[in-house]
């Protein structure tokens, strides 16, 4: 590690390549913490959005009309408004009326912080698209499949959970892959409400070290790596779950 740090110090002195995150422990620590925050935001929002997608798609098939209307309204609202505006709405709008708790010094601190609001906004935004993705997958499953499951003695809920949903999940995996990739990239919007993810800490680093081109290039490469890893994992998952007649492309 000392050799690499010395090499990049020399590159900075001789060629002006100023990658402080390699040879400066403080900047390296800041960037690493931002990377971990980005991964945390993406993972938490991804899992929550998948749950919202499944529940929303099930609600759209519900015989209860108000539940269907509520779900349709949720999907329409979050699909037709910009995600940055949604994040501002949650953090500055709802955040201003949420309860506060005293910190160690007695000052009021919001009960829900900026990280939590970012996860909520990202999950609801991606979840709205996941609802439509899962709905299309459910509609692609032949009705006779659910009827056969019911004829075998399964209840309607058991038929949905054990037969219809697994088949629908296989069908909609390619579209789901695209939406989850978009979610990872959308985590950069958390910068706008002060969440210390990669873009936020990179801005701090290049403001201190005046190395904007180097940090922007590094940021781009790291996001390419993250998205590529997710795409690879999703494709492996898709291949492992593929069944004849379902999920074929």
Image (tube, rainbow, N blue to C red):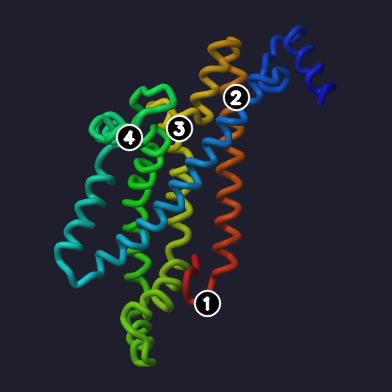
Q: Is residue 84 visible?
A: no
Up the image or down, 233 lies above or below 185; here it is below
Report helix, strand or loop for mark 4. helix
Instruction: Please give the count of numbered marks on the rendered protein.
Output: 4
Q: Nearer the viewer, mark 1 or mark 2?
A: 2
Residue 30 badge = 2
Tag 4 residue: 87
Proximity of marks 2 and 4: CB atoms separated by less than 8 Å:
no
Of pointers 1 and 3, the one earlier in the residue sequence: 3
Going 64% across and 25% down the picture, which residue do you hit? 29
Tag 1 residue: 244
Q: What's the CA distance linking mark 2 and mark 4?
A: 24 Å
Instruction: Report which quarter residue 91 is drawn in.
Output: top left
Q: What's the CA distance linking mark 4 and mark 3?
A: 11 Å
Up the image or down, 214 lies above or below 226; here it is above
Tag 3 residue: 188
Q: What's the CA distance linking mark 2 and mark 3?
A: 16 Å
> Which quarter of the rendered picture does the N terminus lie within?
top right
Q: Nearer the viewer, mark 1 or mark 3?
A: 3
Judge left or right: residue 225 versus residue 199: right
- Residue 90: horizontal and vertical position, in percent? 29, 36
- Residue 126: horizontal and vertical position, in percent? 37, 48
Instruction: Report which quarter residue 19 is drawn in.
Output: top right
Up the image or down, 147 lies above or below 122; here it is below
């Amino acid at each position: 590690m000392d050799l690499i740090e010395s090499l990049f110090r020399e590159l900075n002195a001789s060629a002006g390549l100023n990658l402080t995150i390699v040879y400066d422990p403080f900047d390296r620590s800041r960037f690493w913490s931002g990377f971990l925050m980005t991964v945390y935001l993406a993972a938490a929002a991804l899992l929550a959005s998948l749950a919202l997608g499944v529940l929303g798609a099930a609600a759209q098939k519900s015989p209860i009309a108000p539940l269907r209307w509520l779900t349709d309204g949720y999907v329409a609202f979050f699909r037709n408004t910009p995600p940055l505006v949604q994040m501002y709405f949650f953090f500055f709008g709802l955040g201003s009326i949420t309860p506060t708790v005293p910190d160690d010094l007695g000052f009021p601190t919001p009960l829900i912080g900026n990280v939590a609001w970012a996860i909520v906004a990202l999950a609801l935004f991606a979840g709205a698209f996941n609802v439509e993705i899962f709905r299309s997958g459910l509609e692609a499953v032949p009705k006779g499949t659910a009827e056969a499951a019911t004829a075998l003695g399964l209840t309607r809920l058991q038929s949905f959970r054990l037969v219809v949903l697994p088949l629908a999940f296989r069908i909609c995996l390619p579209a789901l892959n695209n939406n989850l990739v978009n979610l990872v990239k959308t985590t950069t919007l958390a910068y706008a409400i002060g969440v210390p993810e990669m873009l936020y800490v990179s801005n701090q680093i290049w403001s201190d070290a005046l190395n904007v081109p180097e940090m922007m290039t590094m940021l781009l490469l790291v996001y390419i790596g993250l998205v590529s890893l997710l795409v690879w994992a999703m494709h492996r998952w898709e291949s492992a779950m593929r069944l004849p007649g379902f999920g074929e492309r």
